[in-house]
């Protein structure tokens, strides 16, 4: 699999309100054209996983199928 490098300078990172107050959460940026980026909130300058919109939608469908009634990320808020 080839590595792809995306410009994440304009990413608007968000996290779930279900995230704990201890800082353990995953941040998601859906504001980028054609991709969804995911990173660890404790390491905002660390590695970022990127997915196509189709891949991300399949992931969310899988979560919802595995846990009916559970919103994949709860309501989403901006990270600061």
Image (tube, rainbow, N blue to C red):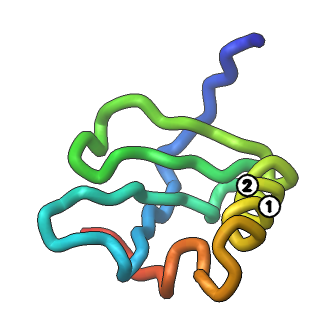
Q: Which residue is mark 2?
A: 59
Residue at 29% x, 52% y is 41
Q: Position of residue 13 (x, y in %)?
A: 44, 62
User: What residue is shown at x 51% (from left), y 48% (from top)?
Assistant: 38
Residue farthest toward the left in the current orientation of the protein? 22
Residue with the mark numbered 1: 57
Q: Residue furthest top?
A: 2
Say if 73 sits above or below 23 in the image.
below
Q: How many marks?
A: 2
Residue positioned 40% across, 81% down in the render: 77
Q: Nearer the viewer, residue 1 or 12?
A: 1
Work out whether 7 lies above or below 60.
above
Please tell me in which quadrant of the rendered image residue 39 appears.
Answer: top left
| In this view, 44 is above or below 75 | above
Q: Residues within 10 Å of mark 1 (few under 14, many from 20)?
A: few
Which residue appears at 63% of the width and 63% of the height? 30
Tag 2 secondary structure:
helix
Disc assigned to residue 39: none
Q: CA distance from mark 2 to mark 1?
A: 5 Å
Q: Secondary structure at mark 1?
A: helix
- Residue 27 visible in the shown view: yes
Regarding residue 34, the answer to whether it shows in the image is no
For this view, does 71 lie left or right of residue 9?
Answer: right
Mark 2–mark 1 CB contact (< 8 Å) = yes
The quadrant in which the C terminus is found is: bottom left
Q: Is residue 6 above or below residue 59?
A: above
Q: Is 21 left or right of 18, judged from the image as shown?
A: left
The answer to whether 36 appears left or right of 62 in the picture is: left
Locate the N terminus by quadrant.
Answer: top right
Label 2: few (<14), some (14–19) or many (≥20) C-alpha neighbours in 10 Å: some
Residue 9 in the image: x percent, y percent?
47, 46
């Amino acid at each position: 699999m080839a590595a792809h490098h995306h410009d994440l300078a304009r990413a608007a990172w968000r996290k779930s309100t279900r995230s704990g107050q201890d800082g353990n959460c995953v941040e998601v940026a859906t504001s980028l054209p054609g991709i969804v980026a995911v990173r660890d909130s404790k390491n905002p300058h660390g590695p970022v996983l990127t997915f196509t919109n189709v891949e991300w939608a399949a992931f969310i469908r899988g979560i919802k199928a595995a846990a009916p009634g559970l919103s994949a990320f709860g309501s989403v808020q901006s990270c600061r």
